[in-house]
Image: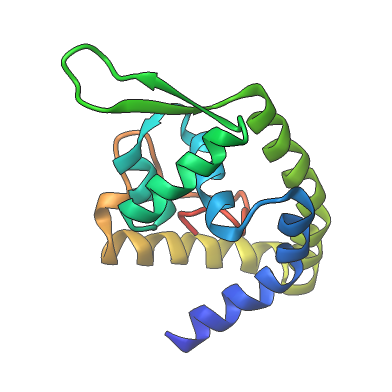
Amino acid sequence: MGLLVGAREAVMASIRPILHDAGVTSAQWRVLRVLFDHGPCDAARVARHAQLLPPSVSRILKELDHRRLVIKEPGPSGVRGSMILLSEEGRRLVAETMARMEPIIEFCAVRFGRKRLAALQKELAAFTLAINPQLFDETMTLPLGSVDFDSPEV
């Protein structure tokens, strides 16, 4: 497992300064990306897909709500809890931050090779599915070619 941690750290070393400039922590970024990628979610689903503990997600959501990056809305009738979605400011922050990450992703694709990277991403998704199948629900499919190093599923 040390190789997985090492690979993640190799990529995150370039990503962390971008997150710092955006004013978000790595954990906050994971929450924002889940909401950006999946749309409105309840807190349990955010925690599951961001691979964070529910109490941590609760604290993160309070902070993001205070900063007006997310909006909490009542859940569907009969469902306990609220749905969380990105505000316009939250969507803008994610889009701008993702754009700043593009050169890093391109560098990795060129340096490692696009085909190898696509194969690696597919294998990591299959590994995640084998180890933690609840991360993949009816709205998700295994990635086949797009490369996104900061996605919670990779």
Residue at 75% from the left image edge and 45% from the top image edge:
97
| Residue that sits furthest to the front in the current view | 66
Q: x%, y% of residue 104?
A: 79, 61
Residue 31 appears anywhere in the view: yes
At a point 50% along the width and 36% down the height, the residue shown is 35
* Residue 32 position (above or below residue 65): below
Q: Residue at x 27, y 15 (%)?
A: 76
Q: Quadrant of residue 92?
A: top right
> Above or below — where is 148 with respect to 66?
below
* Residue 65 percent across, percent down from the top left: 53, 33
Whole-percent x, y for residue 60 in the image: 48, 48
> Which corner quadrant holds the N terminus?
bottom left
Q: Residue at x 45, y 54 (%)?
A: 153
Q: Is residue 5 above or below residue 114?
A: below
- Answer left or right for 82 relative to 69: left
Q: Is residue 46 left or right of residue 149?
A: left
For the view shown, which residue lies furthest in the left direction? 78
139 on left or right of 17 = left
**Outermost residue, bottom direction?**
2
Determine the image quadrant of residue 9.
bottom right
* x, y percent for residue 39: 47, 28
